[in-house]
Image: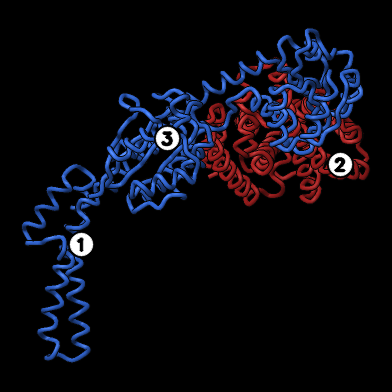
Chain colours: A blue, B red
Amino acid sequence: MSTLSLVGLSHHVAPVELRERVTLDQTASAELAHELGDAVCLSTCNRTELYIADGDDEAATAALERLAGRSLDGVVYRLHDDAAALHLFRVAAGLDSLVPGEGEILGQVRDAFESADPGPLLDRVFRHALAVGKRVRSETAIGESPASVSSAAAALAAQVFGDLDGRRVLLVGAGRIGELAAMNLATRGADIAYVANRSGGAARELAHTFDAKALSLDELGTALGDVDVVVSSTSAPDVVMRATDVPAKRRRPLFFIDIAVPRDLDPAIQELDGCFLYDIDDLEAVVAETLSGRRAEAARAEQLVAEEAERFRSWRASLDVVPAIASLRAYAEQIRSSELAKVSGRVSENERRTLDSVTQQILNKLLHLPTVRMKEAAAGANGASYADAVRHLFGLDDDR
Amino acid sequence: MVEALFWPALLGYGEAAFAYASARTSRAATWGVRLGWMAQTALLAVQAVRADGFPWSSWSGSLNLFVWLVVGTYLIWGCRPRYRLLGLAVMPLAAGLFAVAPVGGGTRTGSRTHYSNVFLVLHVGFVLAAFAGFTLAAALAALYLWEEGRLKRRSADILRLRLPPLASLERLTWRTILVSLPLLTLGLAAGVVRLTQEGHSFDALEALTLATWVLYGSFVLTRPTGRRAAYLALGGFALVIVARLALAGGHFG
């Protein structure tokens, strides 16, 4: 039976300085996999893992050490067969990720699989892993909640407005954190309409990125009547927007995200009807809560992964008896055909067809129960001994 | 036979009222609603076949029909996983009202009234269908206020226990009232025509129903937003409840 091996390193055991040396792009991953034979190379910023069928652990370890430029003793992990499959299932489900349930890894597993040229065992285990990843995401809520401040801000805005498509955003400050939050809103369909900053040059530059209008901080009041979401992240020492700046007569809610320290937005804004203000502490509290929710869901996900790993183990174990079953059936068919051939000259065509059909049915009925029993035994731990017994009793070899 | 159908329906609604409390049991809750509603539909069908006329003109009979319409509206309008907490708002009320219906014989075969079936179907049917819509709108408005409060309080679990967005709740409340108001108008018109023909004066229930119509009419005309819209929808529902529970008895007596 084919063996499955895994050699790799990940964020659990290797620091980023080491991981970045062994991280490969998709083309280089495919080349390495090809070099190792029947293999798949999964390489992301958090892990580089080599899955090999009937391969050599040492060659895989040597390949990783060559990339790292140093010995990987004590850093690299090696897993085999069912343990390697379980590990891959956990990886695809996002259970081995830095943030439990993160969704990107499933696409990375798919890319690694599709860029390699795997044999039957790796094909089966990777397809199964992709199905496990999908099942975990559809049957648990592990990937539903945001895991960063900027994605939490966007999710909260969506909690007010629903679809963010076409919602207009005012970005105050041209710093990196604000830009990230704005990008998160933009990926959900929001329109970054204005960028306001103390420095006109930085505002214009960032406004150009989002195809937005650049404003000075003095013009904030006028823009407020035209937007749905305000994201503020300046380094100003004082408040840049007061509750009195917010237009009193509005029919639409206004959502304020203040990710600056010290805060940019007057806390009194939260008291205004239809206004919702979240500062950095609020957002971090939301993220902490959702992460704890992910961890709770991770327990359910682990159960699903364990179920699937057991199914994979049963499938693999059934491979123990498949050659014996095939040999037994071929042997029986050979006897049937030769006995039929002996009488074929002495019976009519109709009688020959009847004999053919009847003997086929007898054969199927006789072999049905032994076949089922051998598969059942294989699902347990006795598959190999049952297969040996059948070979011995019928004088079979797998090539028959 | 009728009693045999009442209990499965009540059991289904009761199970849903509790099971909607947890996300893990919400699928079982939805099945409870479906099976309960099917049992109640069968109950109403048996009542309709056996009754000599329209069997839901009594106070308790109309309560039975009202619950069926509320649950039916919920099944069509809001029975989605994301609206689990809407089920938590609607189903305890439906189960409670349904449990009260047998007290006045509302789940048994009714007796014949001197009103024609056509009038009763138009008047009672339309008014109760509208009231069912207003009940659902009130549940949506209550969810809106709860979710808005959580957003204002900046609850850390806002994304873990996730409700539909405020905009969706507001839009659905508005649409439900927009659909329900014409039904109430038709039901009231049928009642007023009958009243004029018979020369009766307004009773308290009719006056209250008219006030309800005015309130929801102003809602549709002004299309309020935010908290104001939610409070108005809940205010209208308060009138509906008074009309259903306090004043409906003896209306057709």
> Marks 2 and 3: which is nearer the front?
3
Instruction: Please tell me which residue is depicted at 85% across the width and 33% down the height of the picture.
Output: B216
Q: Secondary structure at mark 2?
A: helix
Sequence order check, earlier mark of 1 and 3: 3
Q: Position of residue A377 (x, y in %)?
A: 19, 47
- Per the rendering, the mark at residue B185 is 2
Instruction: Please tell me which residue is depicted at 6% across the width and 62% down the height of the picture.
Output: A395
Q: Secondary structure at mark 1?
A: helix
Kindly indicate whether the residues beneath marks 2 and 3 are on one polypeptide chain: no
- Per the rendering, the mark at residue B50 is none
Among the 4 quarters of the image, the one containing residue B91: top right
Q: Give the amino acid at mark 1.
A: Ala
Judged left or right of residue A378, residue B57 is right
Q: Is residue A194 visible?
A: yes
Judged left or right of residue B168, residue A56 is left
Q: Position of residue B16 (x, y in %)?
A: 55, 33
> Mark 3 falls within which chain?
A
Query: Which residue, given by chain and number where applicable, does mark 1 sit on?
Result: A326
Q: Is residue B253 visible?
A: no
- Per the rendering, the mark at residue A48 is 3
Report how far apart the C-alphas of labels 1 and 3 lie in the structure. 39 Å
In the image, residue A80 above or below residue A387: above
Task: Give the number of marks.
Answer: 3
> Marks 2 and 1: which is nearer the front?
1
Among the 4 quarters of the image, the one containing residue B106: top right
Report crowding for label 2: few under 14, some 14 to 19, many 20 or more residues within 10 A (C-alpha).
some
> Mark 2 falls within which chain?
B
Q: Position of residue B34 (x, y in %)?
A: 57, 42
Q: Give the amino acid at mark 2.
A: Thr
Asked whether B192 or A280 is in front, the reply is: A280
